[in-house]
Structures are given as structure tokens and as C-alpha cells.
Image (spheres, grey):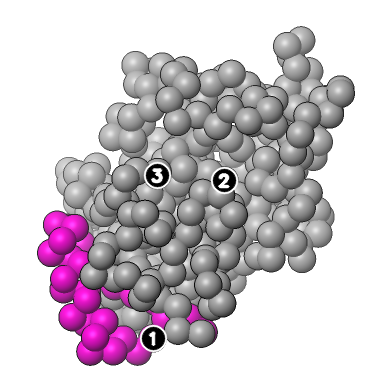
Amino acid sequence: MRITKVFQLLMSLFAGAMACEAGVNFFEFPGGAYAPYWAERPLEAGDTDAEFAVIFVHGLSRQPRDQSPTLRALTQNDPRAARVIFAMPAFFSPRNRPEELKDRIALWDIREHDWRRGDLSFGEAGISSFAVLDRMYELLSDRQCYPKLKHILLCGFSAGGQVVNRYVAVGRFARSAHLQYSFAVGAPSTYLYPDGRRPTAQGTFCEPDPPVAEWDSWHLGLRDRNPYSRDLSRAEIFANLTARPTLYLCGEADVEKSGLAISPGAMTQGENRYRRFLNYRRYVGLFPEWSRQCRFVSVPKYGHQWRGVASAPEFVRLIFGERD
């Protein structure tokens, strides 16, 4: 997509202000909306040597940050490290947007324009946060630009894990025959349950009785979905879940309430992140075809710590497309 001279200047200002390891780039969408992302080079430019691509979705913070240094550190001892490229969308809110980009980039929040749910950004030219991921897949699938690319991993931690968990179910990227796709969901606050059942204290699953407010609404369930996801049938969503290999990770000490969604609907999934992880593992086990595409890994010693959970060997291997 064409980037104006003004945006070229903004890119340099933004990169300096944020002290990013990767550069800051922009996707242009219809209506003049621009969505920023970090990458070591614009995805449109291609990379003739890249074999593995990692799209990482950040979590909630006062200021979203480029995570390429952490990701690079995970692969530095592997001879294939130079053939990995990283791209990271940046979902800014009206409160934490860089001042130099005021009124020039798409903005979301975690309420009515919730980027974790795939909602539309503010303004008339609203774009779904999931559409930003779609654009990344589209560019990485261009075989002329990425002739050697063979695997794309979409991953995220905490709020980013929520994004990936939902995108696995409803993401609209077009599969390419020459590529393999994997997903990694790290310690999300909540999960998407594609039917109304929730875990009980007895170890079974059933609908809450009496019903709990919004327990089955998007993005905890499939009711009242947003424009990006509402046209998919439940059958199509299950087809996505059973066709997209996904690694779920959570620290065994991730039991604190800080940052945890505690609405009545969220609490039907469990009392803390690790318990919700264990409950979701049992729930996925109810569906043999879906379960065969999933792997759940508990990471000893760590709580809600991205660097610790990301050091799990299963995740590091998945960067290179190794799913064993």
C-alpha cells in the first residue's frame, strides 16, 4: 500500500519515540484509515530468504511495545534464526496513542471498540483489528515476495492470547497450498467457548443455571457477534477450530487476579487464568476432531510472565513449524 511522505516522516518520529528494535510501518485501509505495525522491514517489501514468519500480538499495557528483541532472543541459538521474520500489529487507544500520530491512525479500546474481540476501530472508516491480521497473512502469502516462506505462526500472550484464540475460530485469511499455519495462545484472561456449556465444580460441563449475564455473548461465546465474525455459521467456526493447529500455554503459577476478567460471564470459566486453562483443556477434549489439533502445555514455576512462558521448548520449536 502507498505511504505518503507525511507518513514516512511519522514513521521515523514514531520509531524514535518508541525506541523499537523493529521499524514502524503502516497498512492503509479504505476510507483513509492507517494501522501501524512493527516489522524489521515493510511486509510489502518481501524477503527472498525468509522461511518462517511470526506474527505476535501484544497484551494490554500503558504503551504497546515491539517484542522482536524477546522473540529474537528465543531463536538466537538456532542456525535457522536468520530465516525468521517477525511482524507485530500495534493496537493503540485514544489514551495511549503517540501524540505525533494523533488523528492519523486507527484506534481501538477494550470496551465498545475492543481490539481483543476483532471490533471495528473508532470513526467512520472503522476497520476490524482482525482485518489487520488478515492483511499480514495476505502479504506473507505472496510467493513472489516470499518465495521460500513455508510456515506462519500467529501467537500472542495475555490480551494477545485472547486475540489469537478468537482469530483461530473466525479468522478469514485465505490458506495457501505452499504454506503451513500454526497458532499459539499464551495465558489469556478468557477463552472462546463455541457452545453454551461451562465448567462446573463437579468436573462436568453444562449451561449456567440460572443463566449468567453475557456468559455466551461474543467473545466468551458465539452470540451477538460483531461485524467481522457474525456471518460465519457455527459449522464454519467448528471447521476452523478443527483445521488450525493450536498450542495453548499457561504458567502453573498464573493464579493472581491482577488483570483478570472478573465479569459474571468470565467467572463461569474459572477463578484464575491457570484454572481457566485447565478447564478449557478438558472442554476441548469433549470434541475429538478439535482436540487432535490442540496441544496444552503447563509451564512450571512461572506466573503471568511472557518471557517465562515463551521460553517453553514447545513454543520455541513452533516458531520453526515443529509441532511435536
Q: What stretch is highlighted in magenta?
A: 1-30
Q: Which residue is drawn at 40% across and 59% down?
A: 94
Amino acid type assigned to the residue bearing label 2 in the image: Asn
Horizontal and vertical percent for residue 150? 42, 64
| Residue sitting nearer the eye, 245 or 63 | 63
User: Taking 298 as reference, is 214 left or right?
Assistant: right
Horizontal and vertical percent for residue 163? 52, 50
Amino acid type assigned to the residue bearing label 1 in the image: Met
Question: At numbered mark 1, what does the secondary structure look like: helix, strand or loop?
Answer: loop
Question: At numbered mark 2, what does the secondary structure look like: helix, strand or loop?
Answer: helix
Residues at marks 1 and 3 touching, judged by CB atoms closer than 8 Å: no
* In the depicted structure, whether residue 247 falls above or below residue 175: above
User: Taking 270 as reference, is 44 left or right?
Assistant: left
Q: Residue 23 carries which label?
A: none
Task: Give the residue pinned by disc 3.
Answer: 59
* In the depicted structure, whether residue 322 falls above or below residue 53: above
User: Taking 144 as reference, is 169 left or right?
Assistant: right
Task: Give the residue pinned by disc 2.
Answer: 165
Figure quadrant of residue 277: top right
Q: Residue at x 63, y 21 (%)?
A: 270
- Report if residue 24 lies within the magenta region: yes
Q: Residue 1 carries which label?
A: 1
2 or 3: tag closer to the N-terminus = 3
Q: Residues within 10 Å of mark 2 (few under 14, many from 20)?
A: many
Horizontal and vertical percent for residue 99? 25, 65
